[in-house]
Image (tube, helix red, strand yellow):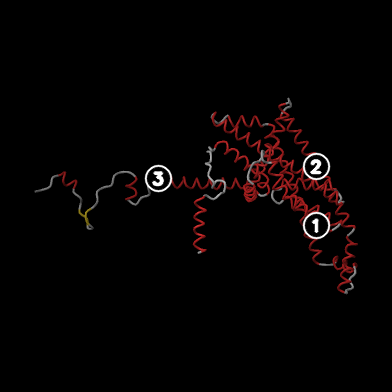
Amino acid sequence: MAPTDETAQVAPQASPFGTTPPDPPPGGDADARGGRMPRWLPRAMVLALALIAVFQLGSWAFHQLTGLLINILIAFFLALAIEPAVSWMASHGMRRGLATFLVFIGSMIVIAGFITLLGSMLAGQIIKMVEGFPEYLDSVINWINTHFHTDLRRVDIQDSLLHSDWLRKYVQNSATGVLDVSAQVLGGLFQLLTIVLFSFYFAADGPRLRRALCSVLPPARQAEVLRAWEIAVDKTGGYLYSRGLMALVSGIAHYILLQALGVPYAPVLGVWVGLVSQFIPTIGTYLAGALPMLIAFTINPWYALWVLIFVVVYQQFENYVLQPKLTAKTVDIHPAVAFGSVIAGTALLGAVGALIAIPAVATLQAFLGAYVKRYDVTDDPRVHGHRTRSSSTFLGRVRGLFTR
């Protein structure tokens, strides 16, 4: 029976390799099966290249603006720190701009006065050490000649030092380093000016900044943002004021010690120890005590030992007695959390991260505490660190097995 026309159209055609498959449906699969590039692939490649380019551009811009972002972060926390004082002055009828200006001027006067006193003290001590260096060198030479039976003279040592190669290289390197130090000083002044300007605008235009931020958020989110802002102001200001109070106590205590020992510049050294020990976390006390120890050593080596002992004892008193009482209501965080936050902040942002780590963590902890739901803890002995009766009985049984 001969096939009809419809049967001939549906029947597959014979080929040398077997039966030929039917024609694929129209679309992307046809291009793939036919060995051609799918239509979506060029667009996907262009989109992937565009995303990579945007990522590279954003990464490059972020690295270029890292310094500016850190300055803005410092300025923001500085504005939060002075916000209570500015708000108090503004609530008494003073304009926020004028109040912020007065706070900054007062702070700059105090800092400039402290730097001036510290600089004059250091300059006086350096001049005194330079003037007394020949006598000190003579005493050292006499001691060496007496104990080692040598015939050293100060003139010979001075001539050998003046004509030595290492002194010439040191002078050349110092002359080259003067330019680097000058560039670093100018960069530091520009960075300080940037921080001051941003912090002034953040503090003076605080209400306008909060209004602009809340204008792009729904009402429910606005309340959360304002609450977070208030918590940040309270914790940052509380951290600053508690540190200032501890600096005052530390400065007075070290001033009394230095005055009793007869160490010169005791008031300035007391202020130095108070500020450095409190605003450089963890190791600030030991760094601050190095300068009084050095000056006390020039008076009497035993005085330096007494200063060292007092610094170590006062550090323990501050850590376990003074700091928990003063920071219980302002920055209520565990000492281990504070220490870990300082290490993390230092790893991320260096010295800046060490300074702002504690108020940042305290703000985050307070914000989470306001929104995380808490439950009453059951009255279980294990909560208080006591062993239960069953566990003690089990331990008694195990102990009895080994004692038989």
- Tags 3 and 1 in contact by the CB under 8 Å rule? no
> Which residue is rendered at x = 53% and y = 44% of the image?
380
User: Mark on residue 305?
Assistant: 1
What residue is disc 2 on? 112
Determine the secondary structure under disc 1.
helix
Q: Nearer the viewer, mark 3 or mark 1?
A: 1
Say which of 373 and 325 sits in front. Answer: 325
Q: Position of residue 326 (x, y in %)?
A: 70, 41
Q: Amino acid at mark 2?
A: Ala
Determine the secondary structure under disc 3.
helix
Q: Nearer the viewer, mark 2 or mark 3?
A: 2
Q: Position of residue 282 (x, y in %)?
A: 69, 50
**Looking at the image, is 102 positioned above or below residue 181?**
above
Q: Amino acid at mark 3?
A: Trp
Question: Earlier along the polypeptide chain: callout 2 or callout 3?
Answer: 3
Tell me which corner region of the image, top left, top right, bottom left or bottom right, holds residue 76.
top right
User: Mark on residue 40?
Assistant: 3
Whether residue 353 sits left or right of residue 12 in the image: it is right
Residue at the outermost top position: 93
- Tags 2 and 1 in contact by the CB under 8 Å rule? no
